[in-house]
C-alpha cells in the first residue's frame, strides 16, 4: 500500500511540475532571471587590459609591409539600416555617415550574402572559408533551456503555426560551450600567423569556448570576449531598454542575460565592462591599433549591436529624435552607436598614418530579424534573419584599402562570407591551407574589370538542416522540408525579380530539377552536423512577430 501511495504522490508531483513547466512559463522565466542575477551579481570592474605591444617605432620600410586588416562585423544588421544603399532606419531619419564614408572611400559589393541566416555558422564561414557541409558547424548554439522555453512560448501564440521541439535531441546535445568550431579547422587568424601578424579579437565569438575552440586557441593572440547578452545592466542610469513582449526569443534573452566580459583564456575572471558594449569595445579596439601600429595586425571587431536585447545609451536615444514606436527609437540609437564605432576606428587609423595600407572590411553576420517587430529593416527585400529569403541573407560588404582599392567601386558579382578568409589571406599574401578544400574565393580580383570578366564561380549554397538553398547564376531555389508540414519550394529569377515576389517553381519544373541536382551534389560528401537541431521554428516571411498571423501568410520552418 505504501508503494502505491508513494507512486501516486510522485505522479502528482510530476503532473504539477509539468503544469508549471508548460502552462506557467513566466514562472520559469522568473527562475532563469533569478539564477542569472546571482551569476552576474558580484563581478568585479573591468581591469586595464594588457594588450600585446608591438615595436615602439616603425620600420623604415613600413609602407612596404603587409597591410593591416580590420574586420568589423555587425550582428543582425538589416540591409536597410544603413544609408549606404539609399535607405536608412526610420526612412533615413538616422543616417550612417561613417559607414557611408567607408563605402565611398572603397568598394561596395551590391550582391553580398551572409554564410547563413543565423549568426554562428556565418561567423564560422568567415573564419574558415568553408561550407558547413565540410565543417559540420551547421546550427547556432543556444544557451541551456533556450530551445525548450522559446519553442513553448511560440506554441502559446494564438493561431500561430506550431513550433517543433525534441527533448530527446536536446539530450544528445553537448554542453553549450562545447558546441563550437572544431580546433582542427584552420581559421584566418591562424593563416595570418604565417606572415607574423599580431591578431586580436574583440566582442562576440559564438564558436565555442572549450576543447581548443576559444579565440586564443584558434589563432588570436588576444581576445576580449563577450560573456553574456546585455549592453549595459538593465537598471543602469545611462541605459534605455526596449523589451519585446511579443517575441519569445527576446523574453528568454532578458531573463538569461548579464553584463559581463573576460580577457584572453576562458578561465580568466569575468568582469563588468567599462560602459556600453559598443563604445567599450571600440575604446579597446583603438588601444589595439595604437599598441600595434608599427607591425602588421589583424583586428576582428565582432560587435553585438544591433542584436537584441534592445538597449541604447540615453545620449543616443535623445540624439535620434522622437521616433515611434519606442523600440524603433532604441534600435535607431543602437545603429547610431554602431556607426560611431566605425567612424572612430577609421579616425584612429587616419590619426596614426595607417589608413593607406589598412584593409577595412565591414559586414553583418546575417539580415535583420522579424522578431524585433520593425517592418522596414530589410527593405526592399522579403524575409528576415532565420529565413533564407534575400532579407535574411543579403548583407552589406564594404572594403576600403586606399593603397589597393579605388574609391567608389560598385561590384554586382554575388559574393558571400565564405570569401572573407581567402580575401584576407590574399591581401596578406598568406597561403591557404593545402590539406583541405577552401570553398571561398578572394574577392580582390573583382576590384578590376578584367577580374570581373574572368570570375569563374556562378553557384552559392546555404545549408541549414532540411532548409537548403542554391543560387546558380541568377536563379535561386529554396527547399523547405519540415517535420510538421508539407515540403515547400520557392524558385526566383533574381535578375528580373530581385525581391522574390513571383514564385516560379510550378512554372519551371525543369529548372527546379536542375537546381535540386546541384543541392544533391553539394550534399553528397557532406559532413554530418556536429550536433542535432532540437527545434524547427516557424518564421513569417512578410510579417514581423508584432503582426498577427492570418491563414495564407507564407512562412518557413527553420531548424536549429
Image: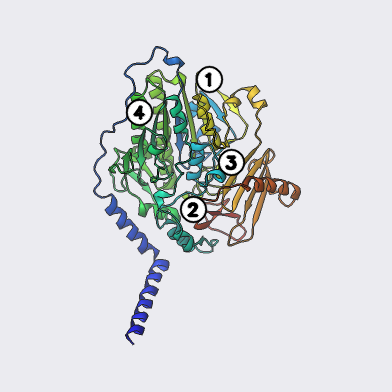
**Which residue is label 4 attached to?**
288
Sequence-first tag of 3 and 1: 3
Per the image, label 4 sits on a secondary structure element best described as helix
Residue 445 lies, with reference to residue 247, above or below; the image says: above
Marks 4/2: CA–CA distance: 36 Å
Sequence-first tag of 3 and 4: 4
Q: Are marks 3 and 1 in contact (CB under 8 Å)?
A: no
**Which residue is label 2 attached to?**
531
Q: Are marks 3 and 4 in contact (CB under 8 Å)?
A: no
Q: Are marks 4 and 2 in contact (CB under 8 Å)?
A: no
Label 4 or label 2, whichever lies nearer to me, is 2
Marks 3/1: CA–CA distance: 32 Å
> Dividing the image into 4 quarters, which one contains the N terminus?
bottom left
Q: Is residue 438 left or right of residue 487?
A: left
Residue 198 lies, with reference to residue 30, above or below; the image says: above
Label 1 or label 2, whichever lies nearer to me, is 2
**Which residue is label 3 attached to?**
380
Question: Residue 391: x percent and y percent?
Answer: 56, 44
- Sort mark 3 into few (<14), some (14-19) or many (20+) by Cα contacts within 10 Å: some
Label 3 or label 2, whichever lies nearer to me, is 2
**Which residue is label 1 attached to?**
404
Question: Residue 412: x percent and y percent?
Answer: 62, 31
- Sort mark 1 into few (<14), some (14-19) or many (20+) by Cα contacts within 10 Å: some
Q: Are marks 1 and 2 in contact (CB under 8 Å)?
A: no
Sequence-first tag of 4 and 2: 4
Q: Residue at x 38, y 14 (%)?
A: 59
Amino acid at each position: 500500500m505504501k508503494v502505491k501511495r508513494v507512486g501516486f504522490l510522485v505522479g502528482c508531483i510530476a503532473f504539477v511540475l509539468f503544469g508549471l513547466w508548460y502552462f506557467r512559463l513566466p514562472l520559469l522565466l522568473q527562475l532563469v532571471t533569478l539564477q542569472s542575477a546571482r551569476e552576474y551579481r558580484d563581478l568585479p570592474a573591468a581591469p586595464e587590459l594588457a594588450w600585446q605591444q608591438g615595436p615602439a617605432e616603425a620600420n623604415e620600410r613600413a609602407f612596404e609591409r603587409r597591410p593591416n586588416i580590420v574586420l568589423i562585423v555587425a550582428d543582425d544588421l538589416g540591409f536597410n539600416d544603413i544609408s549606404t544603399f539609399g535607405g536608412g532606419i526610420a526612412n533615413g531619419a538616422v543616417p550612417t555617415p561613417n559607414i557611408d564614408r567607408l563605402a565611398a572611400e572603397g568598394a561596395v559589393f551590391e550582391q553580398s550574402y551572409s554564410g547563413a541566416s543565423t549568426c554562428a555558422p556565418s561567423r564560422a564561414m568567415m573564419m574558415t572559408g568553408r561550407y558547413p557541409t565540410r565543417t559540420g558547424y551547421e546550427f547556432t548554439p543556444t544557451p541551456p533551456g533556450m530551445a525548450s522555453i522559446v519553442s513553448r512560448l511560440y506554441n502559446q501564440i494564438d493561431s500561430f503555426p506550431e513550433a517543433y521541439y525534441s527533448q530527446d535531441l536536446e539530450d544528445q546535445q553537448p554542453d553549450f560551450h562545447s558546441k563550437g568550431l572544431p580546433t582542427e579547422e584552420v581559421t584566418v587568424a591562424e593563416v595570418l600567423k604565417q606572415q607574423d601578424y599580431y591578431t586580436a579579437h574583440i566582442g562576440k565569438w559564438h564558436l565555442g569556448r572549450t576543447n581548443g575552440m576559444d579565440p586564443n586557441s584558434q589563432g588570436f593572440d588576444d581576445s576580449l570576449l563577450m560573456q553574456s547578452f546585455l549592453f549595459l545592466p538593465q537598471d543602469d542610469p545611462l541605459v534605455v531598454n526596449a523589451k519585446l513582449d511579443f517575441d519569445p526569443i527576446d523574453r528568454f534573452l532578458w531573463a538569461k542575460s548579464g553584463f559581463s566580459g573576460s580577457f584572453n583564456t576562458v578561465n580568466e575572471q569575468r568582469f563588468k565592462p567599462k560602459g556600453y558594449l559598443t563604445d567599450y569595445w571600440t575604446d579597446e579596439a583603438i588601444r589595439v591599433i595604437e599598441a600595434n601600429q608599427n607591425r602588421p595586425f589583424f583586428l576582428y571587431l565582432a560587435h553585438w549591436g544591433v542584436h537584441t536585447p534592445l538597449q541604447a545609451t540615453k545620449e543616443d536615444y535623445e540624439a535620434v529624435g522622437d521616433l515611434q514606436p519606442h523600440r524603433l527609437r532604441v534600435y535607431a540609437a543602437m545603429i547610431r552607436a554602431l556607426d560611431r564605432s566605425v567612424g572612430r576606428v577609421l579616425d584612429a587609423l587616419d590619426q596614426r598614418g595607417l589608413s593607406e595600407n589598412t584593409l577595412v572590411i565591414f559586414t553583418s553576420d546575417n539580415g535583420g530579424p522579424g522578431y524585433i517587430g520593425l517592418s522596414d529593416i530589410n527593405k526592399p527585400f522579403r524575409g528576415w534573419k532565420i529565413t533564407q529569403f534575400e532579407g535574411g541573407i543579403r548583407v552589406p560588404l564594404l572594403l576600403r584599402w586606399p593603397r589597393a582599392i579605388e574609391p567608389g567601386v560598385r561590384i554586382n558579382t554575388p559574393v558571400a562570407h565564405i570569401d572573407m578568409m581567402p580575401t584576407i589571406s590574399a591581401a596578406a599574401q598568406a597561403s591557404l591551407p593545402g590539406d583541405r578544400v577552401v570553398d571561398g574565393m578572394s574577392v580582390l580580383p573583382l576590384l578590376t574589370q578584367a577580374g570581373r570578366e574572368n570570375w569563374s564561380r556562378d553557384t552559392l549554397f546555404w545549408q541549414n538542416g532540411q532548409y537548403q538553398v542554391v543560387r546558380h547564376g541568377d536563379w535561386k531555389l529554396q527547399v523547405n522540408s519540415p517535420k510538421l508540414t508539407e515540403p515547400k519550394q520557392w524558385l526566383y529569377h533574381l535578375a528580373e525579380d530581385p525581391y522574390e515576389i513571383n514564385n516560379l517553381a510550378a512554372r519551371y519544373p525543369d529548372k527546379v530539377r536542375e537546381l535540386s541536382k546541384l543541392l544533391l551534389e553539394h550534399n553528397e560528401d557532406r559532413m554530418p552536423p556536429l550536433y542535432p537541431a532540437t527545434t524547427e521554428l516557424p518564421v513569417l516571411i512578410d510579417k514581423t512577430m508584432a503582426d498577427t498571423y492570418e491563414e495564407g501568410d507564407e512562412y518557413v520552418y527553420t531548424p536549429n
